[in-house]
Amino acid sequence: MKKVFPLAFVCVCLISCPSHGENFPMKLWYNTPAENWMRQALPIGNGNLGAMFFGGIEQEHIQFNEKTVWTGSSALRGSYQNFGDLYIDMSHDSSVTGYRRELSISNALGSVSYKADGVSYLREYFASFPDKVIVMRFTTPGSRGKLSMTLDLTDAHTGGKKTSAENAIGISGTFDLLSYDARLRVVHEGGSLSSDAADKVFVENADAVTVLLAGGTNFNIHNDTYIGETADALALRMQSAINAAAEKSYDELKKNHLEDYRPRYNRVTLDLKEPAPDVPTDTLIRSHVGGNYIDMLYFQYGRYLMLASSRGMDLPNNLQGLWNNDNAPPWQSDIHSDINIQMNYWPAEVTNLSECHLPFLNYIATEALRDGGNWRSSASSLGNRGWTLGIETNIFAHDTKWETNRPANAWYCMHLWQHYAYTNDETFLRQTAYPVMKSACEFWLDRIRLNNGTWEAPDEWSPEQQGLRQSGVPYAQQLIWDLFDKTIKAAEVLNINDSFITDLKTKFTGLDNGLAVGFWGQIKEWKYANSMDTAGNDHRHLSHLVALYPGDGLTALNDERLKTAAKVSLNGRGDTGTGWSRAWKIALWARLLDGDHARALLKAAMNLTTVTDVSMSNNDGGLYENMLDAHPPFQIDGNFGAAAGIAEMLIQSHLGYINLLPALPSAWSSGSFRGLRAQGNFTIDLTWQNSQPVRCTIYSGSGNDCIIHYPGMTEPKVIETVPGGQYTLTF
Ligand code: FUC
């Protein structure tokens, strides 16, 4: 029998902040160098500047990117670019022992170590957010004067300019609109340093070498021209970043990095009671994929990738986060709005990385309200107020016009609301979110049409179900319903009651919520014609279930018929799919409170694949050896979607109360987490045994009433809290 209340409830009115737990070490590691960029190289990043390192023995290869290195403009599609490559030739051959290539998730630190000719070699790599550079350190622990190497920095573009000084190499150039600039500085300790006419830097017999890399463009999203500075000013900015970093010792740079990264990463711990199998990560994925350790690792890797790809500027990460070695990458590695970019941000709030959400949120606000900008013209060209956008956009808001995705404005607004719902940041709601939400509502208020007593969006589509279009498509209706619902809630918080709200409330009452059950028991994907709405349609998109997750409309109704229909739809789509499709299904099953099915999907999402070309097959999705998600090709949404799905199995808070362990898989019968976030500005620690909660600590940020529930509990427990209060429940 399940244990129910009464439970011991200790209200410790300590005014305290959630403690930062110390995670047990999480790392990816391998005993061979990477040969393939997509499948094996390892990513580091500081939020906008990043790199992939291969760990080659005779030659190290570090390919690097910066999030704004794009060709194109607001009138030209262009593409996200590879920035360049750093090659470092070591002066020994490849006969080494004890080789290890590692990425510490706990420290955001890459390393390569081995022994050659009796000398131990160690390389360490990190991308520093505080110091704005990538730092690479080469040492020979226990030996002196043994480091000799040749360094070359190459531009991924012809037509740029390469310069060198004795200890530095630079590349710079101009694309359609933007100028770019990257600089390398080599700092040696002991030995000697020189350069040659071919712009290479040579180090001979040094004790240690630190290599610094800065890079960026003159992009600035807050200027209507998208240009923030001249090419000369950009060069100066890069030069000062390198100069400032070069004045610091390696230890100081590393300390700054760890002090910045670790507290953020350590906000959340997850323990599923399985020690790390002592095998390299490629073997882990091949042979231990059924275990719990890999679930924890994949979860924390998602958080790592978020910190590495979404900080420092008001621009979201893209289809590949920020890692890309191709000047013509799949889908131009753009900002896709029919699932991908949203999924990139699903874990941001619940996994306690709220500040990583801001690059996306501020980007939305900037583009949505830009006078004369592309998103506003997309609305005005239809004769509507407000803003909307297409599926494929570059960083200058250029839209390919390949299929419209008008409801994307509502889906983007869901993120604005969720940031408020988790943080209760009223200033953000008033100044940033509400004007954008209101403007998106205006677009739909102008566009929806009354049909048989309900308001419908005309001429809509269910991504990406061929060309069929009709009125009242559930994908659009569910999203517009969510937008109106949350905008009315936002107005209540902000105490706004004007004619806009009156109009909105009236139309909301008659709005079709996009939730109807069809002839084979499914949630209907089309309102009127069912030609494509069959049980055999195993298409990767799950657009008609957006109200189940990430929306809350379906579960909010608490209607068993709808929940059963959602299961029928999900079973119809099946358990395979592209990378992101598998990830979405984890969260969808978690919302249906089926933990074992959600975990089965998690395992399906960790299917090892070697396919690197674009594949739309449902059978190729999964993971590469470096645990990057394979659509295929590499597409980072699946990493983020899976991390969010795991959180969704452990805690849900979208219905006005906190549901603990709502979809706990039987394989996770004992465990604990610390630091997951819940709507209402709560932070939660939880320990459980025999699939039942044992102890829960709630940190209240805003002093809201906290309603706690878990499956099997007879009635929810309401706890009155004060801002900063800490409350412990034992069950
Ligand atoms: C959408 C998806 C594809 C792919 C692409 C980048 O169009 O339908 O599967 O993820 O985005």
Image: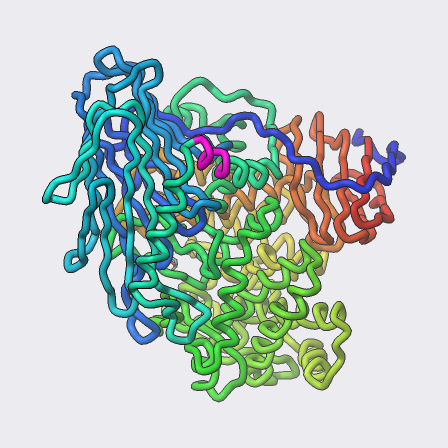
292 lies above or below 67: above
Q: Quadrant of the N terminus?
A: top right
| Above or below: residue 62 compared with residue 692 | below
Q: Quadrant of the C terminus?
A: top right
Q: Nearer the viewer, residue 5 or 158?
A: 158
Most common SS among magenta residues: helix
Q: Residue at x 47, y 51 (%)?
A: 310
As drawn, is 594 to the left or to the right of 6? left
Nearest to the observer: residue 330 or residue 366? 366
Q: Can residue 588 be seen?
A: no
Q: Is residue 451 visible?
A: yes
Colour basis: rainbow
Q: Considering depth in this image, is 703 or 457 the residue closer to the camera?
A: 703
Q: Is residue 478 magenta?
A: no
Residue 55 location, quadrant: top left
Q: Residue furthest top?
A: 118
Q: Quadrant of ligand 1?
A: bottom left
**Where residue 683 sits: x, y (%)?**
70, 44
Q: Give the magenta range.
A: 251-257
Coordinates of residue 724 in the picture (x, y in percent): 79, 46
Give the percent coordinates (x, y) of residue 166: 20, 41
